Amino acid sequence: MRFPLSLYVSMVGYLLRNRLRGRRKFPLVLMLEPTHRCNLACAGCGRIREYHETLNQEMSLEDCLRAVEEAAAPVVTITGGEPLLYGGVEVLVREVLRMGKHVYFCTNGLLLEDALPGFRPSSRFTWNVHFDGTEPVHDAVICREGGFRRALAAVKRAKAAGFRVSTNTTVYRETEVDDLERLFEELTSAGVDGILVAPGFSYGEVPGDVFLTRREIMEKFREIRRWQNRFPLISNPVYLDFLAGHRTLHCTPWGNPTRNPLGWKSPCYLITDTHYPTFEELMAGTDWDHFVSGRDPRCAQCMVHCGYEPTIVQEMNGRDLLRMIRWNLHA
């Protein structure tokens, strides 16, 4: 299976409870950024540029756990920055798992092998390691020679230790589809449990013309979409239809809310207009209709999964559900 059965049970129960309560807007995944500090300066990363003045700030453990309670989402993605640089990260993961959540831990992999003894395998815990291409491409993107080999070695060590491991690949304008194919072959051979692939977001803070337009995204993903049964892709098939231009979707910007050292990020994981002190204020103070409509010019080229996969989950019909079940079982 591409995702553990426990995740499906948690998500279905959560969706049913919210619908019975008549709630229309609720998150599916909490993006928790306890620190923005990082040991890399990747070419396409907007975080270390956007938050360069507050990189020394961290969320307290109490604030992190309060954010998990406030959002009440069944899935918590711990990201950053490089979250393995966060003080007490082992305790954070242990406490979030104790709260019954599923945790996806995003890392560049450089510190992963040394960190493994501080964590325990669980069906509710998945390492999510970033790879932007085969070795020469990845090392060029992260500006660190040897980074690919080190991250891949950590992936193999984590799998050998019994951990679930997925990977995350961002597609840029210069990304060659043939290179992605070779990368996914290598990751599949390493035994990863899932491969997430999505286009990058056009961060204004990132210099250079590295991001794709919607037309360019569709051109690349028409080929990538054909690999659904060849590789363990966890970018779901309906989302891949959207990326290939075969389906129209509206964004669900509240689906993956972000909590970081400055507060609750509004309006979404990708765009920052302000930060709110509480989740309730985020939900009440953001003009969601404006961003759902796509009228904001910053949304024009965005097809990133954090905005559109929540739409699929919340609007799924019976036909889509059967398709998703078959897809999850084919791994």
Image (cartoon, rainbow, N blue to C red):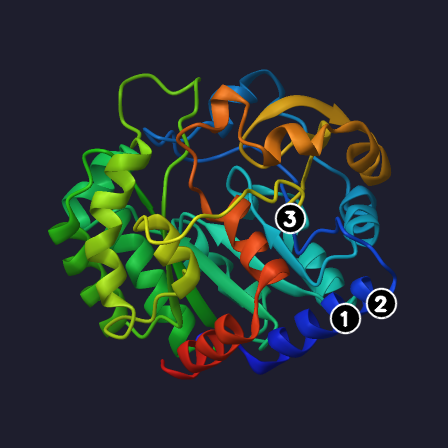
**Marks 3 and 1, how far apart at CA:** 16 Å
Query: Residue 190: x, y in percent?
Result: 27, 71
Furthest residue in direction left, as rendered: 178
Give the quarter of the figure containing the C terminus: bottom left
What residue does disc 2 label? 20
Tag 2: residue type?
Leu
Of the two numbered discs 3 and 1 in the rendering, the one whose residue sits closer to the viewer: 1
Tag 3: residue type?
Gly
What residue does disc 1 label? 16
Residue 328, image quadrant? bottom left
Residue ID at (27%, 44%) = 218
Query: Residue 121: x, y in percent?
Result: 56, 75
| Element under disc 1 | helix
Query: Residue 310: x, y in percent?
Result: 58, 54
Depth check: 46 or 253 in front? Answer: 253
Q: Report whether residue 71 is seen.
A: yes
Depth check: 279 or 137 in front? Answer: 279
Q: Residues within 10 Å of mark 1 (few under 14, many from 20)?
A: few
Residue ID at (49%, 71%) = 320
Residue ID at (79%, 66%) = 99
Residue ID at (40%, 74%) = 159
> Is residue 189 shown above or below 81?
below
| Element under disc 2 | helix
Tag 1: residue type?
Leu
Question: What numbered label is drawn on residue 255?
Answer: 3
